[in-house]
């Protein structure tokens, strides 16, 4: 639809280019009917295209790429296999967490993202355990939609920066890559936005070392403490859903420096609460094998 309406080659629209080709005309009419939960792409204006020759993922998007309508029926996800349910659900959760922490976040994106985190925390394990659990499937379909709306307004962050590079280099599911790197990115970023991550902790239903439920505190010092429970909670969720370590998933240690260098080149396109340089990305990549 993009090329039909605007011409050229899709690679010319990659947003990481110095001068990407502009999208001047709306795409051809599109009715989005998701069968996963998910990318939330039914309510976003972004697309990702894999370039097999360059072994990179290209981000293409803009308001004129939004679907004309979205029809979201949770029944269409009931036959999704458990692992794909887990990976796509973790992608939705990553969208919501990164939207909450993004420097572009606002009241509307916060409202959508917090609800999405809460729904995923409540229902993702259930949807993976029993694909026929219609209440869980409904919750995850809504979580995916809300998270899509959240990040479309607020942006994603360093997890997706890494996922675009790793996903292009290896043939790995996007949601799996997000699940691998979300906890270490949260650990790196939490000090820069403690109140934001404290809100994530509460929405996750995370508990501290004494088993007390996380609550969003009024003071920054307390917020930093509460934010510290987010990464462990995300690691527990990943383990419960069978997410492997990065090395077990196929990410080679020998490629870490190459991945980190490429991420450092593109991170400026993302609204991250704490900027990263190549050495920071290296630390995140290594930490993904430390769960």
Image (spheres, rainbow, N blue to C red):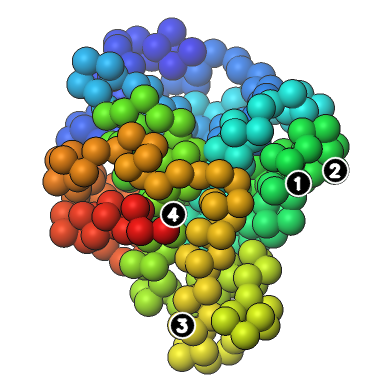
Task: Please identify, in this view, whether the residue under mark 1 or under mark 2 is nearer the observer.
Answer: 1
Q: Where is mark 4, residue-wise?
A: 182
Question: Real-space Cα distance between discs 4 and 1?
Answer: 21 Å
Mark 2 or 3 closer to N-term? 2
**Res. 262 in view:** no
Residue under pointer 1: 126
Is the Cβ of the residue at disc 4 closer than 8 Å to that at disc 2? no
Contact, CB < 8 Å: mark 1 with mark 3?
no
- Name the N-terminal-most of marks 4 and 1: 1
Give the secondary structure at mark 1. Answer: helix
Q: Nearer the viewer, residue 206 or 30?
A: 206
Q: Is residue 130 left or right of residue 166?
A: right
CA distance separating discs 1 and 2: 9 Å
- 286 or 115, nearer to the observer: 286
Residue 9 in the image, given as x and y percentages of width and height: 30, 12
Image coordinates of residue 271 in percent, x first then y, are 36, 56
Q: Earlier in the sequence, mark 1 or mark 2?
A: 1
Q: Which residue is mark 3?
A: 224
In three-dimensional space, the C-alpha distance between marks 4 and 2, rounded to whole angstroms, equals: 26 Å
Question: Residue tagged by mark 2?
Answer: 135
Q: Residue at x 21, y 44 (%)?
A: 253
Q: CA distance from mark 4 to mark 3?
A: 18 Å
Circle 4 packing at 10 Å, graded few (<14), some (14-19), many (20+), is many
* Residue 237 visible here: yes
Query: Are dots 2 and 3 in contact, CB under 8 Å?
Result: no
**Which badge, 1 or 3, comes first in the chain's sequence?**
1
Query: Between marks 2 and 3, how big is the CA–CA gap?
Result: 34 Å
Q: Image quadrant of residue 73? A: top right
């Amino acid at each position: 639809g993009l090329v039909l309406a605007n011409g050229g080659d899709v690679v010319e629209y990659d947003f990481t280019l110095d001068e990407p080709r502009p999208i001047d005309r709306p795409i051809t009419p599109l009715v989005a009917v998701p069968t996963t939960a998910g990318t939330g792409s039914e309510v976003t204006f972004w697309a990702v295209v894999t370039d097999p020759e360059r072994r990179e993922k290209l981000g293409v998007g803009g308001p004129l790429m939004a679907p004309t309508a979205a029809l979201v029926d949770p029944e269409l996800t009931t036959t999704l296999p458990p692992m794909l349910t887990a990976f796509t659900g973790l992608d939705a959760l990553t969208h919501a967490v990164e939207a909450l922490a993004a420097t572009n976040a606002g009241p509307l994106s916060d409202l959508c993202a917090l609800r999405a985190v809460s729904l995923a925390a409540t229902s993702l394990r259930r949807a993976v355990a029993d694909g026929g659990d219609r209440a869980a499937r409904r919750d995850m379909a809504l979580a995916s939609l809300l998270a899509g709306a959240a990040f479309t307004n607020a942006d994603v962050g360093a997890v997706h920066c890494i996922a675009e590079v790793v996903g292009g280099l290896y043939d790995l599911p996007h949601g799996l890559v997000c699940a691998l790197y979300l906890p270490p990115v949260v650990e790196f970023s939490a000090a820069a936005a403690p109140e934001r991550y404290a809100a994530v902790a509460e929405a996750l239903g995370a508990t501290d070392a004494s088993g007390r439920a996380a609550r969003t505190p009024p003071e920054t010092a307390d917020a930093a403490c509460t934010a510290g429970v987010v990464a462990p909670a995300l690691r527990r969720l990943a383990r419960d859903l069978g997410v492997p370590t990065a090395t077990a998933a196929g990410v080679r240690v020998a490629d870490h420096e190459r991945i980190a260098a490429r991420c450092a080149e593109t991170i400026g396109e993302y609204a991250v609460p704490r900027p990263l340089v190549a050495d920071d990305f290296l630390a995140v990549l290594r930490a993904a094998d430390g769960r």
